[in-house]
Image: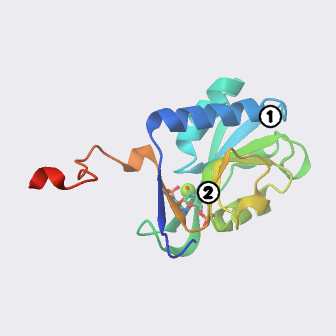
Amino acid sequence: MSNPQNKAFPVSWDQFHRDARALAWRLASSGPFQAVVCITRGGLVPTAIVARELGIKLIETVCVASYHDYTSQGELRVLKEIAEKVVALGGPDGAGILVIDDLVDTGKTARVVRDMLPKAHFATVYAKPLGRPLVDTFITEVSQDTWIYFPWDLGLAFQEPISDVSRG
Ligand SMILES: O=P(O)(O)OC[C@H]1O[C@H](OP(=O)(O)OP(=O)(O)O)[C@H](O)[C@@H]1O
Ligand SMILES: Nc1nc2[nH]cnc2c(=O)[nH]1
Ligand SMILES: [Mg+2]
């Protein structure tokens, strides 16, 4: 993963919806896709948006855990594999299957899932340089030392004014 994480890239619900919809537009000409494989949990929201736009109703999950305290990546564990009958829907090696995640950072998660479905189309909303070669389609690239804050991890909070003149 990216370390140190100097820069913050907070994403609102509106912006995420726009970016995920832009991903769907970009993917529309790469299909047709037989099914979506969603990498949980981060892939759940973009999968819902893309599947709605592309009219895909067959959705499978692959459950991968690696980041334990939001910024440090531990050992990668596959908690749930992709069902064989979903893999069989596509061509050999997952051709015709669309894999979706929210982002690719070091590319470790993408590598593990790519090894399961080498010919699937791999899409993320955001990409960092180390993981970018593993992704077929993405929308926005951020630098490796940026941490992306997703809307489901954020809440409204008071912001200190930029200038302190009002405090006398
Ligand atoms: O390219 P990498 O360095 O492997 O990092 C990318 C992965 O990290 C995040 O998932 P995380 O493991 O934090 O779990 P979550 O999706 O459940 O939040 C993100 O959703 C990607 O799946
Ligand atoms: N939320 C979030 N999860 C990550 N997992 C790996 N990189 C990131 C990131 O930049 N933001
Ligand atoms: Mg994830």
- Beta carbon of the mark 2 residue lies under 8 A of ligand 2: yes
Q: Amino acid at mark 2?
A: Val
The span from disc 1 to disc 2 (Cα, nearest Å) is 28 Å
Q: Answer yes or no: do the residues labelled 1 and 2 have beta carbons within 8 Å?
A: no
Q: Residue at x 58, y 47 (%)?
A: 43
- What amino acid type should be assigned to the residue bearing mark 1? Phe
Q: Is mark 1 within 8 Å of ligand 1?
A: no
Please name the residue shown 90% across and 43% down the image: 91
Q: Residue furthest left?
A: 168
Q: In the figure, 143 relative to 141: above or below?
A: below
**Image quadrant occupied by the C terminus:** bottom left
Q: How is the image coloured?
A: rainbow
- The tally of labels here is 2
65 or 150, which lies in front?
A: 150
Label 1 belongs to which residue?
33
Which numbered mark, 1 or 2, is in the foreground of this view? 2
113 and 164: which is toward the camera:
164
Say which residue appears at 50% left-offset and 75% top-offset.
4
Looking at the image, which residue sits at the far right?
A: 92
Picture quarter with ligand 3: bottom right
Instruction: Please give the residue where the numbered disc 2 appears in the rendered image.
Output: 142
Element at label 2: loop
Quadrant location of residue 86? top right
Question: Can you say whether 166 is above or below 36 in the image?
Answer: below
Please state the horizontal and vertical placement of residue 160, each as a whole percent of the image. Answer: 23, 53
> What secondary structure is marked by label 1?
loop
